[in-house]
Amino acid sequence: MSLLIVTGLGKSFGGNRAVDGIDFSVAPGELLALIGPNGAGKSTTFNMVNGQLKADRGSIRLDGQELIGRKPREVWKLGVGRTFQIAETFASLTVAENVQMALLSADARLFSLWRRAATYRRDDALALLAQVGMVSQADRPCSVLAYGDVKRVELAIALANDPKLLLMDEPTAGMAPAERHALMALTKRLVVERGLGVLFTEHSMDVVFAHADRLIVLARGRLIAQGRPAEIRDDPQVQSVYFGSGKTFEKAGDP
Ligand code: ADP
Ligand code: MG
């Protein structure tokens, strides 16, 4: 049973078919990686799923509901969450306050006084922080956290809306290798526990092959392969289209 079902999805910019009729699905508890060279159509695909770009054709169904034609806010309310980088303005807030802000936003309640927000669903915020291993740092400002810890807070924020599907655009960008694997292992654990699905793009092939349950490979807007990491790694067509001749996934790993 799939959570997200994408069929015949297409988007052109002028005469350029950025995404040219692709089909894929995401199951609950699954981490699906979307990979491909620059200009393959990864961001365009992402932005059609989250409602920021309107598809020209095809269908994107989440739990049976069509997402095409809905505004980003509606798509978010229906259960498509995404990780955001903690904005500069929020860096001065504590870890817990950042998650409380996300809970407020998820509840769509208006608040006029910070005094009210300061106590708002603090227990729920701490429970989310416990899930990402950040409860002991709840009262520190985000600005003083290690980079990998900020990423864990961003994950807690994304989970505050209780999404069914989580979109992650290069979740481990800028992280050291050990931190990358820790973040993805944490993501996998939470995803399985909560039964949500993840669609992510990732530059590090190391991370993709270690943590994705399945991969889809885009090239020039077309889906050229999909399968388990081991299948994709050994696919000669993927090797040649993705990297050109003479390169392999191993060599094309981390920069
Ligand atoms: P990726 O994220 O895989 O690098 P993109 O989805 O950003 O690829 O881009 C796919 C193709 O669509 C590229 O040829 C790119 O130049 C084009 N494209 C993307 N966004 C726009 C846009 N807003 N306007 C015009 N062309 C775009
Ligand atoms: Mg992109």
Image (spheres, rainbow, N blue to C red):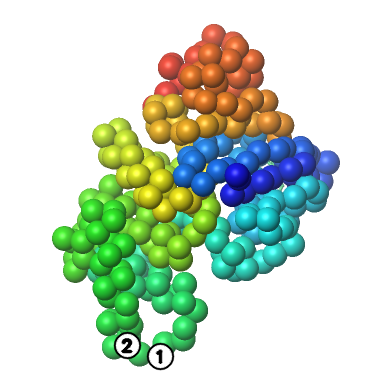
Question: Quadrant location of the N terminus?
Answer: top right
Kind of element beneath mark 1: loop
Seen from the viewer's position, the closer of residues 88 and 193 is 193
Judge left or right: residue 139 versus residue 156: left
Judged by depth in the image, the label closer to the viewer, 1 or 2, is 2
Task: Establish whether ligand 2 lies closer than 8 Å to the Cβ of label 2.
Answer: no
Seen from the viewer's position, the closer of residues 226 and 181 is 226
Question: Quadrant location of the C terminus?
Answer: top left
Residue drawn at 40 percent across, 70 percent down: 102
Specify the quarter for ligand 1: top right
Q: Residue 93's spot in the image, x, y percent?
A: 28, 71
Residue 18 in sight here: no
Residue farthest along the top direction in this orientation: 246
Residue 69 in sight here: yes
Quarter of the image where one finds residue 51: bottom right
Looking at the rendered structure, which numbered label has been put on residue 112?
1
Residue drawn at 28 percent across, 81 percent down: 118
Judge left or right: residue 97 versus residue 248: left
From the image, tell me which residue sits under label 2. Answer: 116
Which kind of residue does numbered mark 2 sit on? Arg
Q: Residue 148's spot in the image, x, y percent?
A: 28, 47
Q: Is residue 117 above or below residue 196?
A: below
Q: Are marks 1 and 2 in contact (CB under 8 Å)?
A: yes
Residue drawn at 41 percent across, 77 percent down: 104
Residue drawn at 60 percent across, 19 percent down: 238
Q: CA distance from mark 1 to mark 2?
A: 8 Å
Seen from the viewer's position, the closer of residues 251 and 235 is 235
